[in-house]
Amino acid sequence: MDELLGRKAPYSRDAEQSILGSMLIDPACIPDVVNSVKGAEFYIDDNRDIFETIFAMFSMGAKVDPVTVLDEMRTRGCLKENSQQYLLELMDVTPTAAHVLKYCEIVRDRALLRALGDSATEIEEQVYQQNGQGQQVLELAERKIYALRKQSVTGGLVPMTNVLQDVLSQISQAAAGGSQLPGISTGLADIDECLQGLGNGDFVLIASRPGMGKTSIALNIAVNAAKTSGKTVAIFSLEMSRQQLVQRMLSSESHIDLYQLNQGRLNSDEWGKLAEAAGVLSKVDIRLDDNPTMTVAEMAAQCRRIENLGLVVVDYLQLMQSAGSGNTWANESRTQAVSDISRMMKVTAKELGVPLVCMSQLSRANEGRQNKRPMLSDLRESGSIEQDADAVIGLYREGYYDRECEDPNSAEAIILKNRHGRVGTVYLRWLPEYTTYVNDDRRHDEDGY
């Protein structure tokens, strides 16, 4: 089509050749190159084959020079009659390896332009084929542009070597970080130990009966994530207003009784604590939306526009009853509707590349058992929720059911599902006057509930 319209795909032969030449004349630059550009960003097939060959050799710790590269190309089945001559030409046309990162920048820019053109063509086809409603096409356009902005792939088969490059980079960063968590910290040490923090793309479900403290622990996690990561945290509350959320965060941060705080009954010391807490919270980037009819699509659209997004919190899943447009689910069961919302949540977390922590209601099933600790099957209108979630945490307090028990503020966060590690019980302490959860001195009880 481009040829018929007299258009030329954006690419730079010189920049592609200079990258390869730099890797051949100075193998020391290869680590910087493979962290800067991907094989798929090379437009010329021969250049892409050579880059991926060198990357494969680098990944295996093999020596890189024209002779070894030719031999590896033969093994990989991409050697051509002129390959030897072409490698020599690459070294000749490369002025210096000192500017290799600039060459990478040029290649990335041209690849972005090509991808943008492909996306624009696909969007245009959807518009003129009238395959969907305007809102659906807009959603498609936003997803594709966001994926380009994040330099991610929106489907299609990807060579494993490309994925391997990303994984090796993640492992290197983890090694450099020492004991640092690979994911975002929840602020609750034993939960972090089990989950290894909140991982990018993870859909984490926190479930309990009403009044158990789902919103409180979600706000704890949100504030801690904003403090420790320096990134933006987006909170979508379908139940509480923005003002109520901020009141809870102020109470938790200042350790001032929430009831007294709301009544304004504060002494001079408490006013000082409140001012200090407000100062701390004003320095973090937490954004709040209290639209009670929020849909997953609307939530995702807002999140895509946040440059430095680190975490998304949704309170709570079952209240997203308007997730479809119009009466999409009018004739469907509520279980199917919630299952669809759950799946969309997981897709959104993966697309955004950040953890998505969502609150969920438990059914009354546990109240008919002698042991009232939550189970996966207690998820209200569960459908496929437990399948979509990467981790499910059930909150339990004996004091919720028996106020006369020995320690009514002792709490358990029961890891019911964990794709990344172990399950079991984490002990927490509930501070009702501040509506917050804190770490408990007791150890994590693996599979011990």
Image: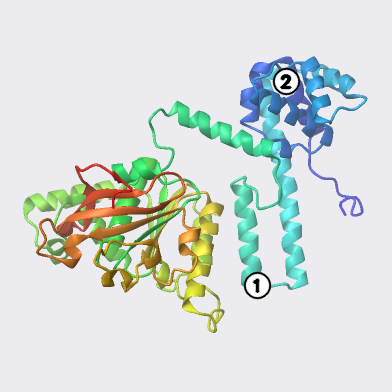
Q: Residues within 10 Å of mark 2 (few under 14, many from 20)?
A: many
Q: Residues within 10 Å of mark 1 (few under 14, many from 20)?
A: few
Separation of marks 1 and 2 at Cα, in angstroms? 48 Å
Q: Nearer the viewer, residue 173 or 242?
A: 173
Q: Nearer the viewer, residue 110 or 411?
A: 411
Q: Is residue 383 left or right of residue 90?
A: left
> Which type of secondary structure does the marked residue at label 2 adopt?
helix
Which residue does the image show at 50% across and 59% down from the upper left? 388
| Residue of label 1 | 134
Spot occupied by residue 255 in the image (x, y as percentages of width and height): 16, 51
Q: Nearer the viewer, residue 341 or 230?
A: 341
Which residue does the image show at 62% across and 25% down from the upper left? 32
Q: Is residue 394 left or right of residue 173?
A: left
Q: Is residue 129 left or right of residue 346?
A: right
Quarter of the image for the N terminus: give it.
bottom right
Identified by mark 2, the residue type is Ser
| Residue of label 2 | 22
- Give the mark nearer the N terminus: 1 vs 2: 2
Which residue does the image show at 68% across and 73% down from the upper left? 132
> Which type of secondary structure does the marked residue at label 1 adopt?
helix
Q: Is residue 253 left or right of residue 257?
A: right
Q: Are marks 1 and 2 in contact (CB under 8 Å)?
A: no
Q: Is residue 42 above or below residue 152?
A: above
Identified by mark 1, the residue type is Gly
